[in-house]
Image (cartoon, rainbow, N blue to C red):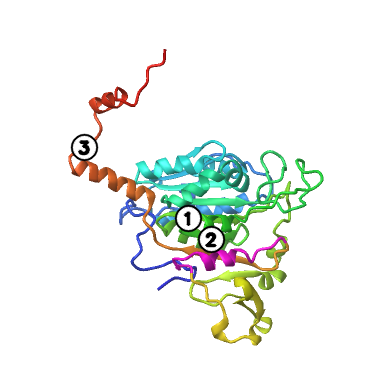
Amino acid sequence: MSTELGMPSLGVPHGTAGVPRLGEDATPQTKKEFTSDQEVRWCPGCGDYAILASVQGFLPELGLKRENIVFVSGIGCSSRFPYYLDTYGMHSIHGRAPAIATGLATSRADLSVWVVTGDGDALSIGGNHLIHALRRNVNMTILLFNNQIYGLTKGQYSPTSEVGKVTKSTPMGSVDHPFNPVSLALGAEATFVARTMDSDRKHLTGILKAAAAHRGTSLVEIYQNCPIFNDGAFDLIKDRSQQEARIVHLTDGERVQVGPEDDRQVLVRAAGGAMEFVPASEVGEREVVVHDATAGDPTQAFALSRLDSPQMTHVPMGIFRNVVRPTYDDLVRAQVDAAVDTGGGPATDEDLDALIHGRDTWTVA
């Protein structure tokens, strides 16, 4: 049984289990209570404003105490996020937000941990930290803002910029092959992977809810416009006259299709294992690919992520994968509890002294 966005609704541990909640008689929280007194400083028209408004509006629905929510960011335009939320937060160092968030999530089961990062911060210097957080399945939600450019440092190409991109650092055009963040996350066997965009408030909020409910690492790629250094990067799928023909809405348990009803195309498996869209009138229902976000094998989800192209002919949106697997932080805490229960107990000064003066030490002349 699942919801519209593919979120399992029964028998699954909630992502915020163990985090203190407001009492039943408490006054419901509002967006205002999650809005800090700091002046928001992004360029006019930046997509970050829309994402911030969605997050501030969604957080009260969690019903959690604000002091038990923490946002960790790295470096970049998106990384100013913690300043604008009235929760705990940390503006950390370049690319290392997932590492810091891992420590928080592991040591503090009473926290709802969020990471805010960008395509440069997460996929360049932070690539190693990102994939290992996904692999370990730490209980955190990662919001990856993808504007396909370095904004804070004034317009260099990023790991998601298209081939041929002319920027200050690639005046003759980029020769790098870009990352597909969703494919990367699925390759790291992330348990929750989704995509949405800044201008679709309803869809963005729905994805945020599902990501927060997931217990494990949730990776949400958010297409975000940079009006100064990469304006219009996603105009083709933001144009209402183009959306129906280009955006592939992924709904768990339903067939994968695109286009208006009178020109509907459905996804089928082609020769060689690839997938392609064909007119619905040309194939039978049994041949059509049905989306299964909860499949243990990520192969089909990965194939869906490969439908992307620089031309944005077909762009999948929604939850690609949402599966249950033990989380790193729950397992570590269980080991600590087991050690205490079997008489190991917490470390003492004597234990530390024995470690320092053990056989695995050397005297350097």
Circle 3 — which element? loop
Disc 1 target residue: 218
To which residue does mark 3 refer? 345
Quadrant of image for the N terminus: bottom left
SS for callout 2: strand
Instruction: Judge by depth and name the residue closer to the eye, 243 or 126.
Output: 126
Residue located at (30% from left, 57% from top): 24
| Mark 3 and mark 1: Cα distance apart in space | 33 Å
Q: Is residue 302 magenta?
A: yes
> Which dot marks residue 200?
none
213 above or below 136?
below
* Residue 164 point in image, percent of width and height: 77, 52
Relative vertical location of residue 188 with respect to residue 347 in this rendering, above or below: below
The label on residue 194 is 2
CB within 8 Å, label 1 to label 2? yes
Q: Earlier in the sequence, mark 2 or mark 3?
A: 2
Type of amino acid at the residue the image marks with label 1: Ser
Quadrant where the C terminus sits is: top left
